[in-house]
Every structure is written in structure tokens, then in C-alpha cells.
């Protein structure tokens, strides 16, 4: 299955572009929170539903990619190359392309800054321990 699309919609003030790139459906939004909130109006998106959607996309040969203007966030379907994170939750046809971009796209900026500070501190501690143990 190949997609061809060129559409812009607005969801709660956020412009969402739906296009295609070499047959892949590409959804691009600067803020994914309104997009996710609108999807939740259809009910919760448990891992089981996501697993089923990913498998159906793969079976039909289709791929959907979710991007922000600065980064690829998620690939689901045929072209997805799963990593440990998605395998752990049992979704074999999905890849979180950039965890920091995913967090930044769906979380308030304060949470992103706090998470970045925690990760930087943890990284600093790990490097400090490596240096001391050498």
C-alpha cells in the first residue's frame, strides 16, 4: 500500500500537516499533545490497540511516520525497525525514533527541562564513577 496525501488541519490551534514521502504517510505537528488528546476522544490507546494497528499496517505494506518540524518521532508499520523499548511492550512494527523528541512533543516544556537536568546529572554521576574506578 502506498499513500499520497497533502493536507493541513488544525487541532486546538496546532497545525497538523498530513503528507506523503515515497509512499509513507507522514503526520507532522509542532506540538503532538492536541493530536494525542483528539485521538483519546475515541477511547484509550492501550498497547493492544497499538499492536493491532502496527500489525495491520505491516500486513498491508503501509508505513506511517509521526514527525515534529525538527525530528522524526515515531515510525509504525512496514518500514519500522523496532528497538528494545518497543519489543519490551510487545509492539514489533513500531519504532520510537527519538525519545527526547517524543518527550518534548508530548510533555510541557517544564517537564522536559526537569527530565533533561535529571538525565544530565545521572550521566555526570556515571562518568564520575567510571573515572574513579579507573
Image (tube, rainbow, N blue to C red):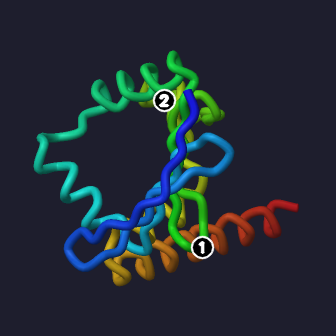
Q: Nearer the viewer, residue 18 or 43?
A: 18
Q: From where the camera sits, is residue 90 visible?
A: yes
Q: From where the camera sits, is residue 85 visible?
A: no
Q: Is residue 38 above or below residue 114?
A: above
In this rendering, position of residue 55 left or right of residue 129: left
Q: Is residue 59 above or below residue 101?
A: above
The answer to which image quadrant residue 89 occupies is top left
Image coordinates for residue 62, horizontal then vertical, percent:
54, 30
Mark 1 or mark 2, earlier in chain: 1
- In the rendered view of the protein, which quadrant contains the C terminus? bottom right
Image coordinates for residue 90, horizontal then vertical, percent:
44, 24
Mark 2 element type = helix
In this rendering, position of residue 22 left or right of residue 6: right
Image coordinates for residue 67, horizontal then vertical, percent:
52, 60
Q: Nearer the viewer, residue 17 or 51?
A: 17
Task: State the separation of the CA atoms marked 1 and 2.
Answer: 27 Å
Disc 1 crowd rating (10 Å Cα; few below 14, some 14-19, many 20+) is few
Q: Nearer the viewer, mark 1 or mark 2?
A: 1
Q: What residue would you read off at disc 2?
A: 88
Tag on residue 70? 1
Q: Nearer the viewer, residue 82 or 16?
A: 16
Image coordinates for residue 15, horizontal then vertical, percent:
35, 74
The answer to which image quadrant residue 52 occupies is top left
Discs 1, 2 touching: Cβ within 8 Å: no
Residue sticking out furthest to the right: 134
Which residue is rendered at x = 35% and y = 83% of the image? Answer: 110
Which residue is rendered at x = 38% and y = 25% of the image? Answer: 51
Amino acid at each position: 500500500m502506498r499513500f499520497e496525501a497533502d493536507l493541513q488541519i488544525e487541532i486546538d490551534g496546532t497545525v497538523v500537516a498530513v503528507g506523503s514521502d515515497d509512499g509513507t504517510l507522514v503526520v507532522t505537528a509542532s506540538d503532538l499533545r492536541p493530536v494525542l488528546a483528539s485521538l483519546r476522544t475515541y477511547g484509550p490507546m492501550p498497547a493492544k490497540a497499538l499492536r493491532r494497528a502496527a500489525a495491520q499496517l505491516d500486513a498491508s505494506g503501509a508505513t506511517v511516520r509521526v514527525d515534529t518540524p525538527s525530528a522524526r518521532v515515531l515510525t509504525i508499520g512496514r518500514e519500522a525497525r523496532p528497538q528494545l523499548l518497543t519489543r519490551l511492550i510487545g509492539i514489533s512494527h513500531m519504532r520510537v525514533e527519538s525519545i527526547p523528541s517524543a518527550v518534548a512533543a508530548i510533555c510541557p516544556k517544564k517537564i522536559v527541562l526537569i527530565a533533561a537536568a535529571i538525565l544530565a546529572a545521572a550521566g555526570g554521576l556515571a562518568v564520575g564513577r567510571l573515572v574513579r574506578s579507573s
